[in-house]
């Protein structure tokens, strides 16, 4: 099921049949460098992740969703919303295969996901985190309206912390 659509992309719920393609993306060292603890993931880890996303969608009404490039109907990564590990906030997350970097896709889909969270899910606040050295991601978060709010630590790693309130986008 499609969640949302932009000019060049759309998000849909994950399916187990996405495991092979997402496994290919999860083996890209550059792509995975700034995701979670960093580092590639094997096919079993990818499958468990997709199962988790499917479960979250059913339980919460949101999750990370399969990111599809419309032109070729190709799975190129994920984007969506999920609770932080401590459940203190809902985080905007995205990941794109390195072959799709530099096209403005991260900004396009993240902005649409942020708006979806506020308008469709009626969220009051959405946060995002990124490694300080991941400057392209820092720029995306600023472009879509998230404001730097300091740092937070997860997995023993220091992340830059951003947030946006629903009224900030009005």
Image (tube, rainbow, N blue to C red):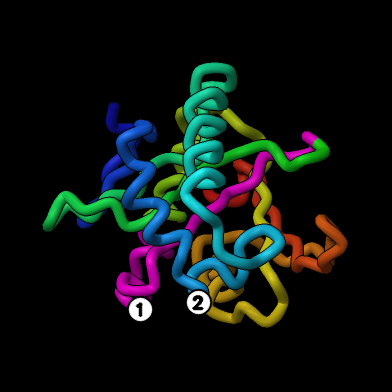
Residue drawn 35% across the image and 78% down it: 102
Q: Is residue 53 above or below residue 77?
A: above
Identify the residue position indicated by label 1 in the image: 102
Q: Is residue 75 above or below residue 149?
A: above
Residue drawn 58% across the image and 49% down it: 92
- For marks 1 and 2, the one nearer the N-term is 2
Q: Is residue 64 magenta?
A: no
Q: Quadrant of residue 153?
A: bottom right
- Tell me where residue 109 appears, x and y as whole percent: 38, 54
Q: Nearer the viewer, residue 56 or 141?
A: 56
Residue drawn 39% across the image and 51% down it: 22
Q: Residue furthest left?
A: 71
Q: Is residue 89 magenta?
A: yes
Q: Please report the bounds of the magenta region as a residue range.
A: 87-108
Q: Which mark is residue 30?
A: 2
| Secondary element at tag 1 | loop
* Marks 1/2: CA–CA distance: 14 Å
| Secondary element at tag 2 | helix
Q: Residues within 10 Å of mark 1 (few under 14, many from 20)?
A: few
Relative placement, left or right, of 108 versus 6 is right
Q: Is residue 141 above or below residue 127?
A: below
């Amino acid at each position: 099921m499609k969640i949302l659509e932009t000019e060049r992309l759309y998000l849909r719920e994950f399916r187990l049949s996405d495991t092979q393609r997402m496994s290919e993306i999860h083996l890209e060292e550059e792509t995975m460098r700034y995701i979670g603890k960093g580092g590639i993931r094997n096919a079993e880890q990818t499958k468990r992740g997709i199962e988790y996303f499917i479960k979250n969608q059913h339980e919460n009404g949101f999750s990370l969703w399969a990111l599809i490039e419309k032109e070729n109907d190709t799975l190129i990564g994920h984007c969506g919303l999920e609770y932080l590990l401590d459940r203190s906030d809902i985080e905007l997350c995205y990941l794109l295969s390195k072959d799709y970097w530099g096209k403005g896709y991260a900004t396009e889909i993240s902005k649409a996901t942020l708006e979806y969270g506020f308008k469709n899910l009626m969220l009051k606040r959405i946060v995002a985190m990124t490694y300080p050295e991941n400057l392209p991601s820092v720029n995306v978060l600023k472009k879509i309206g998230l404001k730097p709010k300091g740092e937070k630590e997860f997995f023993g790693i220091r992340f830059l912390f951003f947030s946006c309130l629903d009224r900030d986008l009005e």
